[in-house]
Every structure is written in structure tokens, then in C-alpha cells.
Amino acid sequence: MAPWVVGRDTYVLPPDTDYQHGTHVASLVAGAHGLNGGHADLPPVGCFVYDVCGLESTPNGGYVTDLITRLEEALKKQPNVRVWNLSLGSPACCDDQTFSDFGQALDRLSDLHNVLFVVAAGNYMVEPRRTWPPVDTLRDRVSSPGDSIRALTVGSVCHVAAPDALNYAGEPAAYSRRGPGPVFTPKPDIVHTGGGVHAPWTPGASSVAVLTAQNLVGRSFGTSFASPIAASMAAHAWQSVAGNTGLEAKPALIKALMIHAAQLSSPGYTPGERRYYGAGLPRDVLAGLYDRPDSFTLLFECRLVPSMRWRKSPYPIPAGLMRDGKLSGEVILTAVYAPPVDTNAGAEYVRANVEIGFGTLSGDSITSKVPMKGEDYTDGYEEAQVEHGGKWAPVKIQRKRFPQGTAGDTWALQARMFLRALEPNMTEGLTVYIICTLRALNGDPEIHAQGMRALAATNWVRQDLPVRVPIQGLA
């Protein structure tokens, strides 16, 4: 690990130190792909590591207040580090109605230092062991600080199958904690490879390969090991965006790119499956930045204020997706923003909500097709919208396939922002990142080129993204 560790900040000394877990985590930041035989689910790019020893290895761990203080100091010392991995968590699940003090502290620090925290969803270790398909009676919801609304919370899936493993490849690991977070906030945001667990509860052939503190390759499992892989990908996405002078790298933007990349490389999940998979597993660090030939993606940075509508129309549609006046294809939407928060408001901690819709225009009125009006609890009772429709959640993901086509001549993408009662007006507005992908269902390789031609016919101010990409060396 020595060539990959660029510095250290130590707050805990022997005998309260344990180098094993930290070495496992750091090795996956630097070289998860190589350690695991070049598995396709693992990104073939690594990152340097800044090592902060801030948590005691005693059976009961350390105090959250101490950990927050140490993290604040480390952030001040390293203002150039933008992505921070936290492979830790409480042994208990989150609260139904209130966000944890630790999660709220991460939200505050993210805003103050312009950093993205990538946080493990937590491990559910008690019996009975969770199986797949799961039952909903277990107390296996995400733990603190995975309930942070600014953080990218990462659950774990299994990448290979093996005899006596508790899960098949592609299934959420038996230990990976699920959503929702407090007030039905969708969590985890994404999943990644955390290793499989074997009966009765041991590592084995399906577990993830890591470097040990003895400088050997071993195997282990946990959301602690899914999180650093995602953090490495997020760091590359941040660097790619930071090289582009037309768009400032922000935590919400990088989070949007990671979640959208997960959507692009994963199937559409049912609402129940999303509580375990989130948006899915991002396989390509740049999937949210570069299109496949059969896809056309646009990213929007918009500033919303209450009572005003943001709209882009007529939306450029690739010609190959329009047949007999109908849009035939798949629409995938991701919206992420950092809403104002109030630590004294309990369940109403999040103070702003954003609605997005992609649909057809008739005069000045839009008929949303993604999501469909009335679908996924987009309207109706507030309680249903919160529980099933993601109202007040700072991440919105939507996708819809139209194999038979859906009629419409003029298409539009729209967003509106609402504040809670008595919340002061936001004079500078709320920045929202919206990513929209239009994808062919038949693999048509002309879609991207057609979309670019349609975009060129508009008068929109635009810029290609990004200008920096990682390069792999071949021996």
C-alpha cells in the first residue's frame, strides 16, 4: 500500500488501533479490480489514499462526538481531498422520524468544505440471517451515518457465487442494510461489491479479495468494502468534472453522476427492490459522463426558486426514437440537490422539495410521462407521496420504457421547487442537477449522433463534459 498512501492523520494510538480493517478498505480504493481478478463489476481505476485513523478499535468503538471532532480537524488539514470514505456505522438501524446527529454533522461538513462523503449502509449481523427474497420483519434498515442526506450511501451486492454462500451473484448481501432512511428517505443510494458471506457466517470464495495488514491477499465481506470502491469511482468522476471550466464540481453533482451511472447499468427495480439496491450498481466510472451509441444524455444545472417553473423545451429527441409521431424508447431521469435543512425540525429536517417531469407540451401545459401523473404516488395524499413517491427526498430517480411508443410532438423537461410552510425564501435559489438519458430499446447505434444533431438545432448554451479521463496502462 505504501506507494498509494499520500499522507496520514492519526488521532488514535495503540492499543486502540487495528490496522486490518483500514488496510482492507484502502486496498480496495487503490486496486479493487486487480485484487479481484479483473472482475467486470469492479472499476479498473484506482485512487491515492489519505489515511485518517480516527476511530478506536475497542469492542464498543469510539464516541461519535470524538469522531466528528477528528473528522472536522482532518477536513481542515486537507482541503484538497474532496471525496471521503467512511466505512463505519452504528450497530442499530436508523430512526423512523429523525435523522441522526452523526448524519446531520456530515451534512453540515459537506456544505462547509464542499466534500462528498461516501458512507457504508451498515451491516446487519444478528440472527435470523436475511435471505433473498427477503422478509420485512427484520430490523435491518440503514444505520447512522448512512442516513445523511448529503452523503452517497452504499449497500452491498455479491459478485460471484460459491458453494455454501448465502447469496447468489447479483443479490443484495445477507448483511447489507436496506432502506428507507428516516421519513422514508430512499437509501441506500447505490450498491457495490462488498463480498459474499458463507454459512454459518464466515468469509470464503465468494467474499471480496483484499490486502491484509500482513501484506497478504485475504477475503472478507461487509458494506465497509462496497463503500471504498464507490468512493474511488466518485473521486475519478470529481476529477473529470473539475477539469471542465464550464461546470464547478459539487458534491450533489458527483452524487448525481454516480446514481445515474448506476441506473444506466442496472435494470429497473420495483419499489421494494430499490430498498436494497438503491439505483443499482455503477460499473463504469464515466458512464454518467459519456454516452453509448444507443443513448443520448444531457446534464442540466438549473437554479430553482419557489413559485417559478424551470423548463427546457422543445426537448431534442433523436430521430430514431420517434416513430409515427410516438416516442419509442426508454427515458431515465436522475435529479439531485442539496436542500436547506433545519436541525430543530425533526421529521421536517429537509425544508425543500423538487418535482421533475418529462413529458409532452400542449400550449403552456405539460403532461408528464416520466413519471406518469398519478403513478408512483406523484399526487394525492401527502402521507402517500412521502412514503411511496419520495417527496422531500433530495434524490429523485425515474425511468420508463415505451416499447409501443407514446404520442407527442413537442417534448419538455420540467422542474419545480417547493418550500415547507414558514421556510424563508431562498434569494439565490436552489441548485439542482438533472440528468436525462434517452435510450433505444433495440440498440440502435445512431441515437447519440442523432441526439447531438437535434441538440445543435436548438439555441441552448451547452458544453461537452468532461475534459479529463483516466487512462489505463497495458503491460
Image (spheres, grey):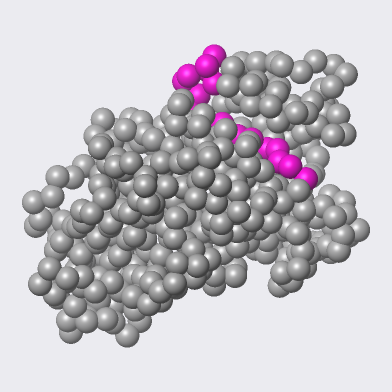
Q: Is residue 150 above or below residue 128?
A: above
On the question of residue 380 being in view, the answer is: yes
Instruction: Report the side of 366 relative to 158 (left or right).
Output: left
Give the residue displayed 64% in from the left and 21% down from the top. Answer: 69
Work out which residue is located at the far front of the displayed protein and give it.
422
Looking at the picture, does residue 248 appear above or below residue 300?
above
| Quarter-of-image position of residue 130 | bottom right
Q: Position of residue 211 (x, y in %)?
A: 75, 34
* Residue at x 14% of width, y 45% of height: 461
Magenta highlight on residue 78: yes
Q: Quadrant of the rendered structure where residue 431 is?
A: top left
Residue 415: percent from left, percent from top: 28, 57
Question: Is residue 450 in sight in this rendering?
Answer: no
Q: Reply yes or no: does residue 445 show up in magenta.
A: no
Magenta-drawn segment: 75-91
Q: Is residue 246 left or right of residue 121?
A: left
